[in-house]
Image (spheres, rainbow, N blue to C red):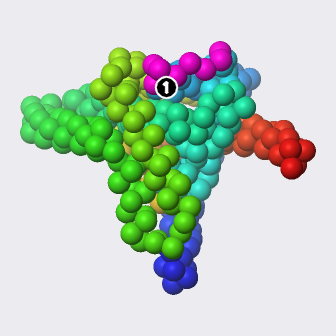
Amino acid sequence: MTGRSHTWHVLLHSLAVLGGFALLGWVVYQVGLTDVLNYLHRIGWWAPFLIVPSLAIALCDAKGWACALPATIHLPHIPLWRWSLARLAGEAVNNLTPTANIGGEPVKVYMLRAHGLTTDVGLASVVVAKTALTVSQVVFVLLGVPFFLYRLGWIAQSWWVIGPLLALAYGFVMLLIHWQRRGLISMAVRALCRILPRWQRLMHWEERAQRIDAHLLSIYDGDSRRFFASTVYHFGGWLLNAVELALFLYFMGVDAPILDALIIETMIQPVSAASLIIPGAVGVQEAGGVYLCRLLGLDDAAGLTLMALRRGREMLFNLVGLTALAHMSGTLLPRKIHSV
């Protein structure tokens, strides 16, 4: 990356972050904090119990990643909580940096190196798990679309929307898996070699990319049940996200059917995904939540409170992940120094 392109990248990222915070400030100004604080006061001492669904979500996603390992790889037993901590560390990096939700994936592998997870196998597993997470997210969003259209009174025209969405989703998933079966990692490294011909380390990465692609092929062609299991666990995590929102609404004292929680959770996903350049989708997620609640007949303050509770949970989990990463870095560094 040249100096000029790097400057433009930093400028674009800075403008996106400032735009996100400006949007957040505008939403808070329009809605006001009085009703939001009233909703939070209603939750009171029940607040610690709201973290229970989040813990279940974290374990489901960790199990989805563990299922993404190739069947030929035999690791020592790694407790599920370690998989979860490693994943939280990677997701913290994804949420707090403008890396389009991929910058934290190598961090997940780094967190489990001490437990026998090699770089090649680890990177292949996070690619498969990320794909399974994306596929389950697409299915989850499609699940909420007919309910959303029903609540808006557009159920008679639903097939004009659902039909094309199903076709697009199917094509996207098939193309995503097709690229990985054709050697996506090797193609990416070769493209970098053409762009940066003087970077000698890329030659080493080309050999490693071929090994990663071999592991990916063994999953998709040799043991697709692991990919299916990973997708199911991640889909369970998305459903638990809707349960979490339903609990938020219940303890806030908002009289809303559980179906509304499912609609809000499914429809907020494409809103957040469309703002990858903004770390954590700051502002965009809050504005989307307020607007969705307005469409469903809920007041704006309820929507902002829901998003604030989600943001609080994300911040807590980011803190846990960064703490685990800092602890791991501190324990590995003395070993490297000692070995030198």
Seen at 51% across and 80% down, the residue is 2
Residue at point 35%, 20% (across, down): 223
Task: Tell me the residue at 86%/50% (across/down).
Answer: 340
Q: Is residue 266 visible?
A: no
Residue 200 on image: x %, y %: 54, 66
Instruction: Tell me which amino acid carries mark 1.
Output: Leu
Q: Is residue 106 left or right of residue 160?
A: right
- In terms of image quadrants, where is residue 168? top left
Residue 106 percent across, percent down from the top left: 58, 45
Dominant SS of magenta comes to loop
Position in image of residue 202 (x %, y %)? 51, 60
Most distant residue in the bottom direction: 4
Task: Kindly identify the residue that appears in the image at 12 percent across and 35 percent down.
Answer: 163
Instruction: Kindly indicate the quadrant of the structure image that contains residue 218.
Output: top left
In the rendered image, the vertical position of residue 332 relative to residue 132, given as above or below: below
Closer to us: 30 or 142: 142
Front-most of residues 48 and 72: 72
44 within the magenta span: no
Relative to the observer, which residue lies in front, 178 or 202? 202
The answer to whether 278 is drawn above or below residue 305 in the figure is: below
Q: Which residues are magenta?
A: 70-77
**Residue under label 1:** 69
Q: Quadrant of residue 36?
A: top right
